Image (spheres, rainbow, N blue to C red):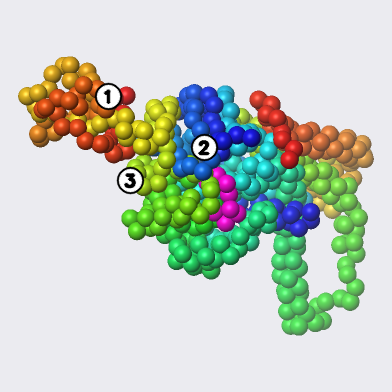
Protein backbone atom coordinates (compact mmCIF):
# COMPACT_ATOMS: atom_id res chain seq x y z
CA UNK A 1 0.00 0.00 0.00
CA UNK A 2 2.63 2.52 1.13
CA UNK A 3 4.99 1.24 -1.58
CA UNK A 4 2.32 1.86 -4.23
CA UNK A 5 1.62 5.31 -2.81
CA UNK A 6 5.31 6.27 -2.98
CA UNK A 7 5.55 4.80 -6.50
CA UNK A 8 2.56 6.87 -7.65
CA UNK A 9 3.96 10.03 -6.08
CA UNK A 10 7.20 9.39 -7.97
CA UNK A 11 5.23 8.79 -11.17
CA UNK A 12 3.34 12.07 -10.72
CA UNK A 13 6.56 13.97 -10.04
CA UNK A 14 8.06 12.47 -13.18
CA UNK A 15 4.95 13.28 -15.23
CA UNK A 16 5.72 16.99 -15.37
CA UNK A 17 6.74 18.00 -18.85
CA UNK A 18 9.89 20.10 -19.19
CA UNK A 19 9.37 23.81 -19.94
CA UNK A 20 9.63 24.32 -23.69
CA UNK A 21 11.12 27.65 -24.66
CA UNK A 22 11.34 26.93 -28.38
CA UNK A 23 7.79 25.98 -29.28
CA UNK A 24 6.05 28.70 -27.27
CA UNK A 25 4.64 31.63 -29.21
CA UNK A 26 6.14 35.01 -28.29
CA UNK A 27 2.90 36.70 -27.12
CA UNK A 28 2.15 33.80 -24.75
CA UNK A 29 5.76 33.94 -23.51
CA UNK A 30 5.53 37.70 -22.87
CA UNK A 31 2.18 37.28 -21.10
CA UNK A 32 3.71 34.60 -18.84
CA UNK A 33 6.61 36.92 -17.98
CA UNK A 34 4.12 39.73 -17.26
CA UNK A 35 2.05 37.47 -14.95
CA UNK A 36 5.19 36.41 -13.06
CA UNK A 37 6.22 40.08 -12.73
CA UNK A 38 2.76 41.11 -11.42
CA UNK A 39 2.74 38.13 -9.01
CA UNK A 40 6.18 39.03 -7.61
CA UNK A 41 5.29 42.75 -7.36
CA UNK A 42 1.94 42.18 -5.59
CA UNK A 43 3.39 39.53 -3.26
CA UNK A 44 6.29 41.78 -2.25
CA UNK A 45 3.97 44.75 -1.71
CA UNK A 46 1.87 42.64 0.69
CA UNK A 47 4.62 40.98 2.67
CA UNK A 48 7.37 43.60 2.51
CA UNK A 49 7.73 46.09 5.33
CA UNK A 50 11.23 47.23 6.09
CA UNK A 51 12.36 43.66 5.60
CA UNK A 52 11.04 40.38 4.26
CA UNK A 53 11.74 37.01 5.81
CA UNK A 54 11.53 33.48 4.39
CA UNK A 55 8.93 32.70 7.11
CA UNK A 56 6.56 35.21 5.54
CA UNK A 57 7.05 34.58 1.86
CA UNK A 58 8.30 30.95 1.87
CA UNK A 59 5.01 29.04 2.43
CA UNK A 60 3.18 31.43 0.09
CA UNK A 61 5.65 31.09 -2.82
CA UNK A 62 6.07 27.34 -2.35
CA UNK A 63 2.29 26.77 -2.34
CA UNK A 64 1.84 28.79 -5.53
CA UNK A 65 4.77 26.90 -7.13
CA UNK A 66 3.24 23.58 -6.10
CA UNK A 67 -0.14 24.46 -7.68
CA UNK A 68 1.65 25.63 -10.86
CA UNK A 69 3.51 22.30 -10.98
CA UNK A 70 0.31 20.27 -10.53
CA UNK A 71 -1.39 22.32 -13.23
CA UNK A 72 1.46 21.40 -15.60
CA UNK A 73 1.19 17.72 -14.67
CA UNK A 74 -2.60 17.51 -14.99
CA UNK A 75 -3.04 19.63 -18.09
CA UNK A 76 -0.16 18.33 -20.09
CA UNK A 77 -0.90 16.84 -23.52
CA UNK A 78 0.83 13.61 -22.46
CA UNK A 79 -0.25 12.48 -19.04
CA UNK A 80 2.09 9.64 -18.16
CA UNK A 81 0.38 9.13 -14.79
CA UNK A 82 -2.88 8.27 -16.58
CA UNK A 83 -1.37 5.37 -18.49
CA UNK A 84 -1.02 3.12 -15.46
CA UNK A 85 -3.89 1.03 -14.09
CA UNK A 86 -5.10 2.91 -11.04
CA UNK A 87 -8.57 4.23 -10.27
CA UNK A 88 -9.52 7.87 -10.72
CA UNK A 89 -10.22 8.17 -6.99
CA UNK A 90 -6.67 7.10 -6.29
CA UNK A 91 -5.34 9.67 -8.76
CA UNK A 92 -7.32 12.53 -7.17
CA UNK A 93 -6.18 11.53 -3.68
CA UNK A 94 -2.56 11.38 -4.86
CA UNK A 95 -2.71 14.73 -6.63
CA UNK A 96 -3.93 16.48 -3.47
CA UNK A 97 -1.26 14.64 -1.52
CA UNK A 98 1.36 15.68 -4.08
CA UNK A 99 0.49 19.35 -3.56
CA UNK A 100 1.59 18.98 0.08
CA UNK A 101 4.52 16.68 -0.73
CA UNK A 102 5.84 19.24 -3.24
CA UNK A 103 5.89 21.97 -0.56
CA UNK A 104 7.52 19.69 2.00
CA UNK A 105 10.23 18.55 -0.45
CA UNK A 106 10.94 22.14 -1.54
CA UNK A 107 10.90 23.32 2.08
CA UNK A 108 13.38 20.63 3.17
CA UNK A 109 15.65 21.35 0.18
CA UNK A 110 15.56 25.10 0.89
CA UNK A 111 16.05 24.57 4.61
CA UNK A 112 19.06 22.28 4.09
CA UNK A 113 20.47 24.67 1.49
CA UNK A 114 20.05 27.69 3.79
CA UNK A 115 21.46 25.74 6.74
CA UNK A 116 24.53 24.71 4.74
CA UNK A 117 24.96 28.22 3.36
CA UNK A 118 24.55 30.01 6.70
CA UNK A 119 26.58 27.33 8.49
CA UNK A 120 29.41 27.75 6.01
CA UNK A 121 29.37 31.56 6.26
CA UNK A 122 29.20 31.51 10.06
CA UNK A 123 31.83 28.75 10.22
CA UNK A 124 34.24 30.62 7.96
CA UNK A 125 33.49 33.85 9.85
CA UNK A 126 34.20 32.14 13.17
CA UNK A 127 37.49 30.72 11.89
CA UNK A 128 38.60 34.12 10.59
CA UNK A 129 37.25 36.34 13.46
CA UNK A 130 36.56 34.09 16.50
CA UNK A 131 36.43 37.12 18.84
CA UNK A 132 33.50 38.62 16.89
CA UNK A 133 31.11 35.82 18.00
CA UNK A 134 29.49 35.90 21.44
CA UNK A 135 28.90 32.64 23.30
CA UNK A 136 25.10 32.93 23.68
CA UNK A 137 22.46 33.52 20.98
CA UNK A 138 21.10 37.08 20.79
CA UNK A 139 17.86 37.74 22.68
CA UNK A 140 16.22 39.35 19.68
CA UNK A 141 16.05 36.06 17.76
CA UNK A 142 14.18 34.31 20.59
CA UNK A 143 11.91 37.33 20.92
CA UNK A 144 11.08 37.33 17.22
CA UNK A 145 10.15 33.60 17.12
CA UNK A 146 7.65 34.05 19.96
CA UNK A 147 6.38 37.28 18.49
CA UNK A 148 5.40 35.95 15.06
CA UNK A 149 3.77 32.64 16.07
CA UNK A 150 0.24 33.87 15.27
CA UNK A 151 1.44 35.23 11.94
CA UNK A 152 3.12 31.93 11.12
CA UNK A 153 -0.10 30.02 11.89
CA UNK A 154 -1.97 32.41 9.58
CA UNK A 155 0.60 31.73 6.84
CA UNK A 156 0.08 27.99 7.31
CA UNK A 157 -3.68 28.42 6.80
CA UNK A 158 -3.10 30.62 3.73
CA UNK A 159 -0.74 28.00 2.29
CA UNK A 160 -3.33 25.24 2.87
CA UNK A 161 -6.05 27.29 1.15
CA UNK A 162 -3.78 27.99 -1.85
CA UNK A 163 -2.79 24.31 -2.12
CA UNK A 164 -6.27 22.80 -1.87
CA UNK A 165 -8.29 25.41 -3.77
CA UNK A 166 -5.54 25.77 -6.41
CA UNK A 167 -5.29 22.01 -6.88
CA UNK A 168 -9.09 21.72 -7.21
CA UNK A 169 -9.03 24.38 -9.97
CA UNK A 170 -6.39 22.43 -11.91
CA UNK A 171 -8.98 19.65 -12.36
CA UNK A 172 -11.18 21.91 -14.53
CA UNK A 173 -10.81 20.58 -18.07
CA UNK A 174 -11.77 23.72 -20.00
CA UNK A 175 -8.69 25.92 -20.23
CA UNK A 176 -10.71 29.16 -20.36
CA UNK A 177 -12.76 28.26 -17.30
CA UNK A 178 -9.63 27.11 -15.48
CA UNK A 179 -7.75 30.34 -16.21
CA UNK A 180 -10.78 32.42 -15.18
CA UNK A 181 -11.05 30.44 -11.94
CA UNK A 182 -7.35 30.97 -11.21
CA UNK A 183 -7.75 34.69 -11.93
CA UNK A 184 -10.84 34.94 -9.69
CA UNK A 185 -9.17 33.01 -6.88
CA UNK A 186 -6.03 35.19 -7.12
CA UNK A 187 -8.01 38.45 -7.08
CA UNK A 188 -10.13 37.35 -4.07
CA UNK A 189 -7.04 36.03 -2.24
CA UNK A 190 -4.89 39.11 -2.79
CA UNK A 191 -7.91 41.35 -2.05
CA UNK A 192 -8.39 39.71 1.37
CA UNK A 193 -4.67 40.01 2.15
CA UNK A 194 -4.63 43.71 1.18
CA UNK A 195 -7.69 44.41 3.34
CA UNK A 196 -6.11 42.54 6.25
CA UNK A 197 -2.86 44.45 5.81
CA UNK A 198 -4.84 47.71 5.82
CA UNK A 199 -6.07 46.98 9.37
CA UNK A 200 -2.65 45.93 10.69
CA UNK A 201 -0.76 48.17 13.13
CA UNK A 202 2.82 49.28 12.56
CA UNK A 203 5.31 46.75 13.95
CA UNK A 204 6.96 47.79 17.27
CA UNK A 205 10.54 47.45 16.04
CA UNK A 206 9.89 49.02 12.63
CA UNK A 207 8.39 52.11 11.01
CA UNK A 208 6.10 50.14 8.70
CA UNK A 209 3.64 47.24 8.70
CA UNK A 210 5.58 43.96 8.86
CA UNK A 211 3.06 41.25 7.89
CA UNK A 212 3.86 38.53 10.46
CA UNK A 213 4.80 40.82 13.35
CA UNK A 214 1.96 43.28 12.76
CA UNK A 215 -0.62 40.48 12.52
CA UNK A 216 0.69 38.93 15.74
CA UNK A 217 0.13 42.16 17.70
CA UNK A 218 -3.31 42.87 16.19
CA UNK A 219 -5.99 42.86 18.92
CA UNK A 220 -8.30 40.82 16.65
CA UNK A 221 -5.58 38.28 15.74
CA UNK A 222 -7.15 35.41 17.69
CA UNK A 223 -10.61 35.97 16.20
CA UNK A 224 -9.16 36.21 12.68
CA UNK A 225 -7.18 33.02 13.25
CA UNK A 226 -10.29 31.12 14.38
CA UNK A 227 -12.27 32.37 11.36
CA UNK A 228 -9.38 31.49 9.02
CA UNK A 229 -9.05 28.02 10.58
CA UNK A 230 -12.75 27.31 10.01
CA UNK A 231 -12.55 28.72 6.46
CA UNK A 232 -9.47 26.59 5.75
CA UNK A 233 -11.20 23.40 6.86
CA UNK A 234 -14.30 24.23 4.78
CA UNK A 235 -12.23 25.15 1.70
CA UNK A 236 -10.05 22.03 1.98
CA UNK A 237 -13.07 19.70 2.23
CA UNK A 238 -14.92 21.55 -0.56
CA UNK A 239 -11.80 21.45 -2.77
CA UNK A 240 -11.34 17.70 -2.40
CA UNK A 241 -15.04 17.21 -3.14
CA UNK A 242 -14.78 19.50 -6.20
CA UNK A 243 -11.67 17.67 -7.47
CA UNK A 244 -13.47 14.34 -6.98
CA UNK A 245 -16.57 15.62 -8.79
CA UNK A 246 -14.55 17.02 -11.69
CA UNK A 247 -12.26 14.05 -12.18
CA UNK A 248 -14.01 10.97 -10.83
CA UNK A 249 -17.74 11.34 -11.36
CA UNK A 250 -18.71 10.55 -14.93
CA UNK A 251 -21.30 13.03 -16.20
CA UNK A 252 -22.83 10.20 -18.25
CA UNK A 253 -22.89 7.84 -15.27
CA UNK A 254 -21.02 4.74 -16.51
CA UNK A 255 -21.32 1.72 -14.30
CA UNK A 256 -18.29 0.53 -12.41
CA UNK A 257 -17.57 -3.18 -12.70
CA UNK A 258 -16.25 -4.85 -9.58
CA UNK A 259 -14.06 -7.74 -10.61
CA UNK B 1 -18.59 -12.11 -22.49
CA UNK B 2 -18.08 -10.44 -25.86
CA UNK B 3 -16.08 -11.33 -28.95
CA UNK B 4 -14.94 -7.74 -29.34
CA UNK B 5 -11.78 -6.49 -27.68
CA UNK B 6 -12.93 -2.95 -28.46
CA UNK B 7 -16.38 -1.72 -29.39
CA UNK B 8 -17.23 1.88 -30.25
CA UNK B 9 -20.89 2.85 -30.48
CA UNK B 10 -22.12 6.22 -31.77
CA UNK B 11 -19.11 8.03 -30.37
CA UNK B 12 -19.15 11.84 -30.58
CA UNK B 13 -16.55 14.27 -29.31
CA UNK B 14 -15.55 17.89 -29.86
CA UNK B 15 -12.01 19.20 -29.95
CA UNK B 16 -12.05 22.93 -30.72
CA UNK B 17 -13.56 23.32 -34.19
CA UNK B 18 -13.08 19.65 -35.03
CA UNK B 19 -15.57 16.97 -34.07
CA UNK B 20 -15.92 13.21 -34.22
CA UNK B 21 -19.37 12.31 -35.44
CA UNK B 22 -21.22 9.04 -34.80
CA UNK B 23 -18.17 6.81 -34.89
CA UNK B 24 -19.04 3.11 -34.94
CA UNK B 25 -16.66 0.18 -35.32
CA UNK B 26 -15.29 -2.74 -33.37
CA UNK B 27 -12.06 -4.70 -33.11
CA UNK B 28 -12.70 -8.43 -32.78
CA UNK B 29 -10.50 -10.44 -30.43
CA UNK B 30 -7.40 -11.85 -32.08
CA UNK B 31 -7.50 -9.46 -35.05
CA UNK B 32 -5.62 -6.42 -36.29
CA UNK B 33 -7.65 -3.36 -37.22
CA UNK B 34 -5.95 -0.71 -39.35
CA UNK B 35 -7.24 2.82 -38.84
CA UNK B 36 -6.45 4.88 -41.92
CA UNK B 37 -7.08 8.45 -42.92
CA UNK B 38 -5.18 11.46 -44.16
CA UNK B 39 -3.44 13.91 -41.80
CA UNK B 40 -6.05 15.76 -39.76
CA UNK B 41 -8.78 13.19 -40.54
CA UNK B 42 -9.28 12.51 -36.82
CA UNK B 43 -7.22 9.35 -36.14
CA UNK B 44 -5.34 10.70 -33.12
CA UNK B 45 -8.46 12.48 -31.80
CA UNK B 46 -10.40 9.22 -32.09
CA UNK B 47 -7.70 7.27 -30.22
CA UNK B 48 -7.51 9.95 -27.51
CA UNK B 49 -11.31 9.84 -27.16
CA UNK B 50 -11.23 6.04 -26.96
CA UNK B 51 -8.65 6.34 -24.18
CA UNK B 52 -10.75 9.00 -22.41
CA UNK B 53 -8.06 11.67 -22.80
CA UNK B 54 -10.57 13.73 -24.81
CA UNK B 55 -14.03 13.61 -23.18
CA UNK B 56 -16.79 12.11 -25.31
CA UNK B 57 -20.00 14.09 -25.73
CA UNK B 58 -22.10 11.04 -26.62
CA UNK B 59 -21.78 7.34 -27.32
CA UNK B 60 -19.79 4.62 -25.60
CA UNK B 61 -16.44 2.87 -25.80
CA UNK B 62 -16.30 -0.67 -24.45
CA UNK B 63 -13.13 -2.61 -23.79
CA UNK B 64 -14.00 -6.29 -23.67
CA UNK B 65 -17.56 -5.17 -22.92
CA UNK B 66 -16.57 -2.78 -20.11
CA UNK B 67 -16.53 1.02 -20.18
CA UNK B 68 -13.22 2.71 -19.30
CA UNK B 69 -14.73 5.31 -16.96
CA UNK B 70 -14.70 3.96 -13.42
CA UNK B 71 -12.96 0.74 -14.47
CA UNK B 72 -9.46 2.10 -15.19
CA UNK B 73 -7.73 -0.39 -12.90
CA UNK B 74 -9.09 -3.37 -14.87
CA UNK B 75 -8.91 -1.90 -18.37
CA UNK B 76 -5.58 -0.08 -18.28
CA UNK B 77 -3.95 -3.27 -17.03
CA UNK B 78 -5.18 -5.04 -20.17
CA UNK B 79 -4.26 -2.45 -22.80
CA UNK B 80 -0.96 -1.19 -24.11
CA UNK B 81 -0.84 2.18 -25.86
CA UNK B 82 1.77 3.67 -28.17
CA UNK B 83 1.10 7.38 -28.68
CA UNK B 84 2.08 9.41 -31.74
CA UNK B 85 4.91 10.98 -29.71
CA UNK B 86 6.79 9.92 -26.61
CA UNK B 87 4.83 10.40 -23.38
CA UNK B 88 7.75 9.73 -21.07
CA UNK B 89 9.91 12.62 -19.82
CA UNK B 90 12.91 12.87 -22.12
CA UNK B 91 15.27 13.69 -19.26
CA UNK B 92 14.82 10.16 -17.89
CA UNK B 93 16.68 6.99 -18.83
CA UNK B 94 14.62 3.98 -20.00
CA UNK B 95 15.63 1.99 -16.89
CA UNK B 96 14.24 4.80 -14.72
CA UNK B 97 11.00 4.93 -16.74
CA UNK B 98 10.64 1.16 -16.26
CA UNK B 99 11.28 1.54 -12.53
CA UNK B 100 8.56 4.21 -12.28
CA UNK B 101 5.95 2.40 -14.40
CA UNK B 102 6.51 -1.31 -13.60
CA UNK B 103 5.18 -1.34 -9.99
CA UNK B 104 1.65 -0.67 -11.25
CA UNK B 105 1.41 -3.80 -13.39
CA UNK B 106 1.00 -7.21 -11.77
CA UNK B 107 2.49 -8.95 -14.78
CA UNK B 108 5.19 -6.51 -15.92
CA UNK B 109 7.75 -8.68 -17.69
CA UNK B 110 11.24 -7.35 -16.93
CA UNK B 111 12.81 -10.07 -19.07
CA UNK B 112 10.67 -9.04 -22.03
CA UNK B 113 11.74 -5.41 -21.48
CA UNK B 114 15.41 -6.41 -21.71
CA UNK B 115 14.75 -8.61 -24.75
CA UNK B 116 12.83 -5.93 -26.64
CA UNK B 117 15.39 -3.24 -25.79
CA UNK B 118 18.06 -5.54 -27.18
CA UNK B 119 15.91 -6.44 -30.20
CA UNK B 120 15.50 -2.75 -31.11
CA UNK B 121 19.13 -1.99 -30.20
CA UNK B 122 18.17 0.60 -27.59
CA UNK B 123 20.55 1.52 -24.79
CA UNK B 124 18.55 1.42 -21.51
CA UNK B 125 21.08 3.65 -19.76
CA UNK B 126 21.00 6.49 -22.26
CA UNK B 127 18.63 9.42 -21.64
CA UNK B 128 15.56 9.50 -23.90
CA UNK B 129 16.65 12.98 -24.93
CA UNK B 130 19.62 11.42 -26.72
CA UNK B 131 17.35 9.01 -28.62
CA UNK B 132 16.30 9.81 -32.18
CA UNK B 133 12.55 10.14 -32.90
CA UNK B 134 12.54 6.61 -34.29
CA UNK B 135 14.29 5.24 -31.21
CA UNK B 136 11.82 7.06 -28.94
CA UNK B 137 8.95 5.50 -30.86
CA UNK B 138 10.53 2.05 -30.52
CA UNK B 139 10.89 2.65 -26.77
CA UNK B 140 7.19 3.58 -26.63
CA UNK B 141 6.42 0.23 -28.28
CA UNK B 142 8.64 -1.63 -25.80
CA UNK B 143 6.84 -0.04 -22.84
CA UNK B 144 3.42 -0.78 -24.32
CA UNK B 145 4.20 -4.49 -24.71
CA UNK B 146 5.97 -5.30 -21.43
CA UNK B 147 2.84 -5.92 -19.35
CA UNK B 148 1.48 -8.39 -21.93
CA UNK B 149 -1.67 -6.45 -22.85
CA UNK B 150 -4.66 -8.11 -24.54
CA UNK B 151 -5.35 -5.05 -26.68
CA UNK B 152 -2.60 -2.90 -28.18
CA UNK B 153 -3.48 0.55 -29.49
CA UNK B 154 -0.86 2.18 -31.68
CA UNK B 155 -1.18 5.75 -32.93
CA UNK B 156 1.00 6.09 -36.02
CA UNK B 157 3.85 4.05 -34.55
CA UNK B 158 5.72 3.81 -37.84
CA UNK B 159 5.42 7.49 -38.85
CA UNK B 160 8.92 8.58 -37.81
CA UNK B 161 10.69 5.33 -38.60
CA UNK B 162 13.00 4.43 -41.47
CA UNK B 163 11.90 1.51 -43.71
CA UNK B 164 14.05 -1.03 -41.81
CA UNK B 165 12.72 0.02 -38.42
CA UNK B 166 9.16 0.06 -39.83
CA UNK B 167 9.58 -3.48 -41.08
CA UNK B 168 10.92 -4.50 -37.65
CA UNK B 169 7.86 -3.03 -35.90
CA UNK B 170 5.45 -4.67 -38.33
CA UNK B 171 7.26 -8.02 -37.96
CA UNK B 172 7.17 -7.70 -34.18
CA UNK B 173 3.41 -7.13 -34.26
CA UNK B 174 2.96 -10.10 -36.59
CA UNK B 175 5.07 -12.24 -34.28
CA UNK B 176 2.92 -11.16 -31.34
CA UNK B 177 -0.23 -12.12 -33.18
CA UNK B 178 1.14 -15.52 -34.15
CA UNK B 179 2.57 -16.44 -30.74
CA UNK B 180 -0.10 -15.01 -28.49
CA UNK B 181 -3.67 -14.08 -29.28
CA UNK B 182 -3.93 -10.36 -29.03
CA UNK B 183 -5.95 -7.59 -30.66
CA UNK B 184 -4.40 -4.55 -32.25
CA UNK B 185 -5.76 -1.18 -33.33
CA UNK B 186 -3.13 0.34 -35.59
CA UNK B 187 -3.57 3.90 -36.81
CA UNK B 188 -1.43 4.99 -39.74
CA UNK B 189 -1.39 6.82 -43.03
CA UNK B 190 1.38 4.53 -44.33
CA UNK B 191 -1.00 1.99 -45.79
CA UNK B 192 1.72 -0.38 -47.03
CA UNK B 193 2.28 -1.37 -43.37
CA UNK B 194 -1.33 -2.46 -43.17
CA UNK B 195 -1.23 -4.52 -46.39
CA UNK B 196 1.01 -6.95 -44.52
CA UNK B 197 -0.74 -7.30 -41.20
CA UNK B 198 -4.27 -5.86 -41.02
CA UNK B 199 -7.34 -8.10 -40.96
CA UNK B 200 -9.79 -5.19 -40.98
CA UNK B 201 -9.55 -1.61 -42.19
CA UNK B 202 -11.44 1.41 -40.88
CA UNK B 203 -11.16 4.65 -42.79
CA UNK B 204 -11.86 7.97 -41.11
CA UNK B 205 -12.21 11.32 -42.86
CA UNK B 206 -13.16 14.64 -41.31
CA UNK B 207 -14.20 12.95 -38.07
CA UNK B 208 -16.58 10.48 -39.73
CA UNK B 209 -16.09 6.80 -40.50
CA UNK B 210 -16.04 6.26 -44.27
CA UNK B 211 -15.98 2.45 -44.05
CA UNK B 212 -15.00 -0.31 -41.66
CA UNK B 213 -14.67 -3.80 -43.07
CA UNK B 214 -12.41 -6.81 -43.65
CA UNK B 215 -9.28 -6.00 -45.64
CA UNK B 216 -9.65 -8.82 -48.19
CA UNK B 217 -13.40 -8.27 -48.47
CA UNK B 218 -12.71 -4.58 -49.13
CA UNK B 219 -9.96 -5.25 -51.68
CA UNK B 220 -12.29 -7.71 -53.44
CA UNK B 221 -15.15 -5.23 -53.38
CA UNK B 222 -13.31 -2.57 -55.37
CA UNK B 223 -11.31 -2.55 -58.59
CA UNK B 224 -8.93 0.04 -59.96
CA UNK B 225 -10.02 0.90 -63.50
CA UNK B 226 -7.67 2.26 -66.21
CA UNK B 227 -9.80 3.81 -68.93
CA UNK B 228 -8.66 4.91 -72.41
CA UNK B 229 -9.23 8.60 -73.11
CA UNK B 230 -11.55 8.00 -76.07
CA UNK B 231 -13.56 5.38 -74.18
CA UNK B 232 -14.62 7.73 -71.39
CA UNK B 233 -18.33 8.49 -71.23
CA UNK B 234 -20.65 10.04 -68.70
CA UNK B 235 -22.04 6.59 -67.90
CA UNK B 236 -18.56 5.34 -67.02
CA UNK B 237 -17.89 8.48 -64.95
CA UNK B 238 -21.05 7.84 -62.98
CA UNK B 239 -19.83 4.34 -62.10
CA UNK B 240 -16.51 5.58 -60.74
CA UNK B 241 -15.75 6.43 -57.14
CA UNK B 242 -13.22 9.21 -57.64
CA UNK B 243 -11.44 9.84 -60.90
CA UNK B 244 -7.98 11.03 -61.91
CA UNK B 245 -6.65 12.00 -65.36
CA UNK B 246 -3.35 10.35 -66.32
CA UNK B 247 -1.03 10.58 -69.37
CA UNK B 248 -2.75 7.54 -70.89
CA UNK B 249 -6.36 8.28 -70.04
CA UNK B 250 -8.22 8.05 -66.77
CA UNK B 251 -7.86 6.08 -63.58
CA UNK B 252 -10.58 5.55 -61.03
CA UNK B 253 -12.00 3.25 -58.42
CA UNK B 254 -15.09 1.24 -59.18
CA UNK B 255 -17.10 -1.48 -57.53
CA UNK B 256 -15.94 -4.91 -58.71
CA UNK B 257 -19.57 -5.82 -59.36
CA UNK B 258 -20.03 -2.84 -61.73
CA UNK B 259 -20.35 -3.30 -65.49
CA UNK B 260 -16.99 -1.58 -66.09
CA UNK B 261 -15.02 -4.76 -65.41
CA UNK B 262 -16.38 -6.30 -68.64
CA UNK B 263 -15.72 -3.33 -70.96
CA UNK B 264 -12.89 -4.03 -73.44
CA UNK B 265 -11.27 -0.55 -73.31
CA UNK B 266 -11.15 -0.62 -69.54
CA UNK B 267 -8.52 -2.63 -67.69
CA UNK B 268 -9.28 -3.39 -64.08
CA UNK B 269 -6.76 -4.45 -61.46
CA UNK B 270 -6.92 -5.23 -57.74
CA UNK B 271 -6.42 -1.94 -55.86
CA UNK B 272 -4.15 -1.35 -52.88
CA UNK B 273 -5.43 0.08 -49.59
CA UNK B 274 -3.77 3.34 -50.60
CA UNK B 275 -5.75 3.44 -53.89
CA UNK B 276 -8.99 2.96 -52.00
CA UNK B 277 -7.99 5.58 -49.42
CA UNK B 278 -7.02 8.12 -52.12
CA UNK B 279 -10.15 7.68 -54.23
CA UNK B 280 -12.52 7.45 -51.29
CA UNK B 281 -10.93 10.61 -49.92
CA UNK B 282 -11.22 12.47 -53.23
CA UNK B 283 -14.86 11.36 -53.63
CA UNK B 284 -15.75 13.27 -50.49
Q: Which residue is mark 1?
A: B257
- Disc 1 versus disc 2: distance between alpha carbons? 28 Å
- Element marked by disc 2: strand
Pointer 1 or 2: first along the chain: 2
Pointer 2 or 3: first along the chain: 2
Q: Which residue is mark 3?
A: B192
- Element marked by disc 1: loop
Q: Is residue B169 above or below residue A40?
A: below
Q: Mark 3 falls within which chain?
A: B
Q: Residue at x 44, y 59 (%)?
A: B135
Q: Mark 1 Cα within 10 Å, few/some/many (few <14, many 20+)?
A: few
Image position of A250 (left or right of B192): right
Residue A207 seen by the camera: no
What span is colored magenta in the figure?
B145-153
- Element marked by disc 3: helix
Q: Is residue A92 above or below residue B137?
A: above
Q: Mark 3 Cα within 10 Å, few/some/many (few <14, many 20+)?
A: few
Q: Is residue B147 magenta?
A: yes
Q: Quadrant of the C terminus of chain B?
A: top left
Amino acid sequence: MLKKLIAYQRLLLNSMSPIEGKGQNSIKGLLNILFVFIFVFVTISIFMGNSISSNEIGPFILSVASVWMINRILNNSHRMFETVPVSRKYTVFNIFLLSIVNVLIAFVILWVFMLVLIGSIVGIGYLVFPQGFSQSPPDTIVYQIVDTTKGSILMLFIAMIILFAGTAITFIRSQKLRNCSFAGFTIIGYGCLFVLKGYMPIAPNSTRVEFLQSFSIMPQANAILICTAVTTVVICIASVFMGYKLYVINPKGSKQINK
Amino acid sequence: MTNNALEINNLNASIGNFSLQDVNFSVAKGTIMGLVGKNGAGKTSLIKTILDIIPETAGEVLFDGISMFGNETIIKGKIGVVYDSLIYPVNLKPVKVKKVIAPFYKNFDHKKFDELMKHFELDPNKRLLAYSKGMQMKFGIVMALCHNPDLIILDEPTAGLDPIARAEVVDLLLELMQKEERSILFSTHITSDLEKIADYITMIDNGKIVFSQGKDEMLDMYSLAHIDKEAMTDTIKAELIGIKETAFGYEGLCATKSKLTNVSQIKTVRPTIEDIMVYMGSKR
